Image: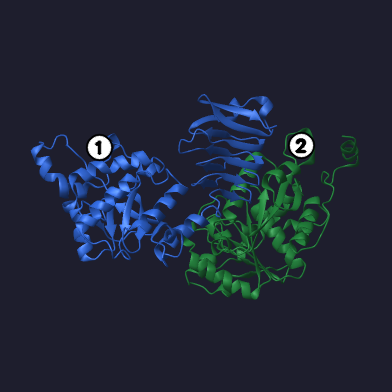
């Protein structure tokens, strides 16, 4: 039986899809059969980040509406045999998602995979609601700035009240905080919220801190999940987060700027 | 004498003007007299009923009033009713008599009265005739009423009498009552009553306060409809706490708190760390800009003083 994990945030642009790709790829690299699902109907992105946009024939909505079988819509990743992608429709909207349809697809995937990662759209409306509804765990992606933190807080409230687990009175959805686009230099200057401040407001366990890094954007544009780049700080931080998601105890790495020149690194140390 | 001739038990017969007494058979004088006993008793607030309140209170028994008073109302041109009739419960003592009203009965009664000389003064008494076979005729009742009144006991009616006894009692100006319920039964094993009695007993056990142990997130609204709201975790900015009573927050308070929303001006808000967006008591509010700077992130209580919202440090 697979664990269903929703990657959510409330706010847009904080790195949900990047995180979905990275965590999905990271779990597959560790030998777990993993499927990533794009719930952002109408704004299809996950397939691009995963580098399989040209291979999409059928999608999530086709499966929900019975136009295609699940196996026809699932795309197997070329780099990792344990990784599959269920892309979404670019031409439809969120109303095409139904409770019964989503439940049927997730139940089917649950039997075949170890991890089902749902990439939630931004917002708290239908798409986001259905992405989180059947989840067992949640990764709340947050940037260290006030609006993102508040939206994450709102989403945490919804996770504790508007999910199947909450409605059936089962154990609450286990929520993890993933802090992305964290820039230690700006935190030191006081431009950015500190980890402790974010944790104090959200009061959920920290899954990882992903430093702001140009490699993330580069990886997205190349369609290669950033976790493949084990040389970059961001790639390593995602790798650690994957391990923690699997239950391993790993210390948080000291955060430094990513791959700077010697001179800059020296300057950083004195700062 | 094997049997105690007279027993004044804790038995209470409930007199209800609406239920036990048929209006048609009730003498008018009796209606106006009834409150007087109770005012003189004075102990039971429910039983306090002077003529003024008797006149003012007419809301409940309108049907009853129509049935008995409408003919009068027609004469009085319906503008101001000359009298009003309401149903009301009174507590009466039941005097159980065995045998007849002989010397032994009066001796036992006097010894009983000697224990509490003023306790029964002017209390309405109902005579239980179940075992009182020796008292039958109207003259017996007239004598008994006179003897009792001389001992400051007011007999108003009889119960459990035979047809002959009832006729005699009526001719002596006494009521014949049916039913009545012992007070002991009310808290004892009467099935209909134990339900409400048990409910009344269990009520203090279930607190009316609402206890929240999880963090209250942005966009969540917690409403304590019945009383106090206690939050053990933090309250995020954008969350709202609403309570009819007081609000207690033991975590960081960043949201809004509205206490005494039903207008209770005695309601208060207690914070371990005040960082709220808004606080309000009984509709009077302050936003965070108006908080004194020294109160920020401190342990405070918020209360109303002379229609003004005050934030005071908790010592």
For chain A, the rendered hue is: green
Q: Is residue B19 above or below residue B282?
A: below
At x 69% / y 48%, what residue is drawn?
A: A203
Q: Position of residue A223 (x, y in %)?
A: 69, 58
The residue mark sitting in front, 1 or 2, is 1
Farthest left residue in view = B75
Q: Position of residue B260 (x, y in %)?
A: 50, 37
Which disc is residue B55 wearing?
Answer: 1
The chain letter corresponding to blue is B
Gap in Å between the C-alphas at discs 1 and 2? 79 Å
Quarter that holds the N terminus of chain A: bottom right
Q: Which residue is mark 2?
A: A186
Q: Is residue B197 left or right of residue B180?
A: right
Q: Position of residue A134 (x, y in %)?
A: 57, 64
Q: Secondary structure at mark 1?
A: helix
Q: Position of residue B27 (x, y in %)?
A: 18, 48
Q: Is residue B218 visible?
A: no
Q: Is residue A250 above or below residue B272?
A: below
Which disc is residue A258 wearing?
Answer: none
């Amino acid at each position: 039986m697979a664990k269903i994990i929703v990657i959510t945030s409330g706010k847009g642009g904080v790195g949900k899809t990047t995180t979905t790709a990275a965590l999905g790829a990271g779990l597959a690299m560790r030998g777990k059969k993993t499927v990533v699902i794009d719930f952002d109907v109408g704004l299809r992105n996950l397939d691009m980040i995963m580098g399989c946009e040209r291979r999409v024939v059928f999608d999530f909505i086709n499966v929900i509406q019975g136009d295609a079988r699940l196996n026809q819509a699932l795309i197997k990743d070329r780099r990792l045999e344990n990784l599959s992608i269920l892309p979404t429709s670019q031409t439809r909207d969120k109303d095409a998602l139904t409770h019964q349809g989503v439940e049927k697809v997730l139940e089917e995937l649950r039997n075949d995979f170890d991890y089902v990662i749902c990439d939630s759209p931004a917002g708290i409306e239908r798409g986001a609601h259905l992405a989180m509804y059947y989840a067992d765990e949640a990764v709340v992606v947050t940037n260290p700035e006030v609006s993102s933190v508040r939206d994450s807080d709102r989403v945490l409230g919804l996770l504790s009240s508007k999910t199947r687990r909450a409605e059936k009175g089962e154990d609450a959805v286990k929520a993890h905080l993933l802090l992305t686009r964290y820039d230690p230099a700006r935190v030191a200057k006081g431009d950015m919220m500190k980890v402790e401040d974010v944790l104090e407001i959200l009061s959920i366990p920290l899954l990882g801190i992903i430093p702001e890094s140009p490699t993330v954007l580069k990886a997205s544009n190349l369609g290669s999940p950033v976790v493949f780049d084990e040389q970059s700080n961001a790639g390593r931080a995602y790798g650690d987060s994957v391990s923690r998601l699997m239950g391993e105890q790993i210390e948080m790495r000291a955060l430094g700027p990513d791959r700077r020149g010697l001179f800059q690194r020296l300057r950083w140390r004195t700062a | 004498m094997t049997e105690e001739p007279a027993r004044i038990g804790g038995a209470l017969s409930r007199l209800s003007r609406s239920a036990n007494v048929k209006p048609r058979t009730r003498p008018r004088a009796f209606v106006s007299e009834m409150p007087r006993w109770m005012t003189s008793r004075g102990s039971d607030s429910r039983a306090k009923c002077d003529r003024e309140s008797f006149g003012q209170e007419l809301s409940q028994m309108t049907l009853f009033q129509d049935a008995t008073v409408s003919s009068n109302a027609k004469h009085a041109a319906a503008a101001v009713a000359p009298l009003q009739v309401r149903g009301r419960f009174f507590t009466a003592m039941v005097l159980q008599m065995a045998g007849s009203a002989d010397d032994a009965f009066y001796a036992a009664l006097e010894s009983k009265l000697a224990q509490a000389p003023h306790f029964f003064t002017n209390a309405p008494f109902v005579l239980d005739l179940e075992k009182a076979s020796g008292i039958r005729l109207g003259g017996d009742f007239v004598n008994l009423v006179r003897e009792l009144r001389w001992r400051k006991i007011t007999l108003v009616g009889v119960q459990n009498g035979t047809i002959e006894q009832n006729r005699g009692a009526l001719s002596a100006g006494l009521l014949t009552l049916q039913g009545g319920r012992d007070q002991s039964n009310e808290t004892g094993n009467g099935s209909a009553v134990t339900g409400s009695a048990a409910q009344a007993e269990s009520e203090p056990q279930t607190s009316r306060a609402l206890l929240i142990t999880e963090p209250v997130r942005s966009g969540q609204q917690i409403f304590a409809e019945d009383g106090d709201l206690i939050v053990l975790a933090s309250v995020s900015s954008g969350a709202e706490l609403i309570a009819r009573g007081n609000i207690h927050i033991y975590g960081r308070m960043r949201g809004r708190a509205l206490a005494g929303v039903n207008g209770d001006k005695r309601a208060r808000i207690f914070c371990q760390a005040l960082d709220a967006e808004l606080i309000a008591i009984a509709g009077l509010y302050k936003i965070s800009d108006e908080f004194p700077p020294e109160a920020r992130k401190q342990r405070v209580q918020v209360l109303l003083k002379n229609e003004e919202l005050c934030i005071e440090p908790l010592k």
